[in-house]
Image (tube, rainbow, N blue to C red):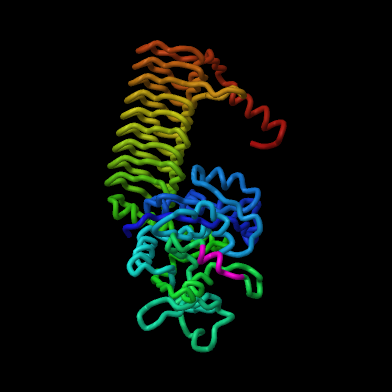
Amino acid sequence: MSLELSVVVLAAGMGTRMKSALPKVMHKVAGKPMVGHVIDTAAHLKAAKTMVVVGPDMPDLIKTVAPHPTFEQTDRLGTAHAVLAAKDGLKGLTGNVLVLYADSPLFTAETLARLVAAREENDHAVAVLGFRPEDPTGYGRLVTDQNGNLTAIVEDKECNDAQRQINFCNSGVMCFKAEDMIATLEAIDNANAKGEYYLTDAVEVAQKNGQSCVAVEVDEAETLGVNSRTQLAVAEGILQDRLREQAMVDGATLIDPASVFFSADTKLGRDVIVEPNVVFGPGVVVGDNTVIKAFSHLESCVVGEGADIGPYARLRPGAEIGAGARVGNFVEIKKAVVEDGAKVNHLSYIGDARVGAKANIGAGTITCNYDGFRKQHTDIGAGAFIGSNSSLVAPVEIGDGAIVGAGSTITGKVEADALTLTRAERIEKKGWAAKFREKMSQLTGKK
């Protein structure tokens, strides 16, 4: 691939079979809208220009694909009509134009690069991606000649007996010679049962103009178009398998790969160990030599080198875990920095806070960060020790090296190296419990 590349992404469909108020292509696979996957693939191809064709009243979709320009297909009159909605963006382009579908998030950059290179090789007017399903029924057939040139795309219902035996089928993805594209699309008519303008007819138009076309084969798994929730789940499964494989290729150990779920942007360092049943939401970065233990959930957070997370830990957006830090079982961290070597070992909530380096947070400790109207900050100094079952009522500051006694409720500043505790006076009434049991036994008849 050496010529300039532009991309048109078709995203105007509503997806009625999804039974959703959300535009079909906004449904997520691996934590990212399907249209986002397609745009990212275009970016990997270093596309000079990416345009998105949307339908009427899709403001959220337009916002999602920004800053890429959008063009509205007001009347949905077929795929060729949809591409021509971007006519103003196509004018003056040179080289190649890829037409992609926003509901087909599984095509790889490598596959699309092969398609573009095949179009360039003999200056074909059109290149089409094809696949070979076990059962081709329902798919348009790609008819090729003895030289491998694509001569026609024939819809299943229009196939003759010989064409019906062909198992080389149309994926829908096409690459055009940019200089001829508009003229080719404008020559397509709607003389068919649906009265629509089909992009597949571009091959027939090119043939009539004496131009050649070519088909490139791709694995069927990449061609999946999502039109239902069931197909959305299939796409999720395929992409998760890819992400798991890539994580292991890049040097992470997944104890039980099938039980680990990634987002498309998850970044794991080398020698990370991920135990079973871990979920990575969007925006997670994990440093080298880290252990993520079973049943942990991480989202929009950063985990430093050599940290130890879980089991059953939850790192929410804004959590920053330092090198060698420990976040243990049933601990929730939200919008908080846990600095190098600090420990929050179990049963704690740390939100809107800083936990200083090598500080220790005892079991059951919580930062009381919300007063019903505002989120307030808690600052815990380096080397501080917070005793179990303590409540730190923000805004509050615990100085370096300070100790907070177990069971305390802290509402004001604790000086560095000080011991602070708040406890009610102890009351003990000897023999009271035995007398209580005797009395209740007489009243209830129970011993």
Quadrant including the N terminus? bottom left
Along the viewing direction, whichever of 385 and 108 lies nearer the viewer: 108
Along the viewing direction, whichever of 233 and 135 lies nearer the viewer: 135
Residue depicted at 51% across the width and 66% down the height: 184
Along the viewing direction, whichever of 377 and 21 lies nearer the viewer: 21
Task: From the top left corner, tell me how far across and down residue 246 is, in percent.
Answer: 34, 55
Quadrant including the C terminus? top right
In the displayed structure, would residue 362 be above or below residue 20?
above
In the image: residue 101, left or right of residue 373: left
In the displayed structure, would residue 385 be above or below residue 116?
above
The answer to whether residue 364 shows anywhere in this view is no
Q: In this picture, which residue range is highlighted in magenta?
A: 183-189
In the image: residue 256, left or right of residue 314: left
Task: From the top left corner, tell me how far across and down residue 177 is, in percent.
Answer: 42, 63
Q: Does 111 lie within the magenta span? A: no
Residue depicted at 46% across the width and 21% down the height: 378
Residue depicted at 48% across the width and 31% down the height: 349
Residue depicted at 66% across the width and 70% down the height: 195
Task: From the top left corner, tell me how far across and down residue 157 is, in percent.
Answer: 59, 80
The answer to whether residue 382 shows anywhere in this view is yes
| Residue found at the very far bottom of the displayed protein | 161
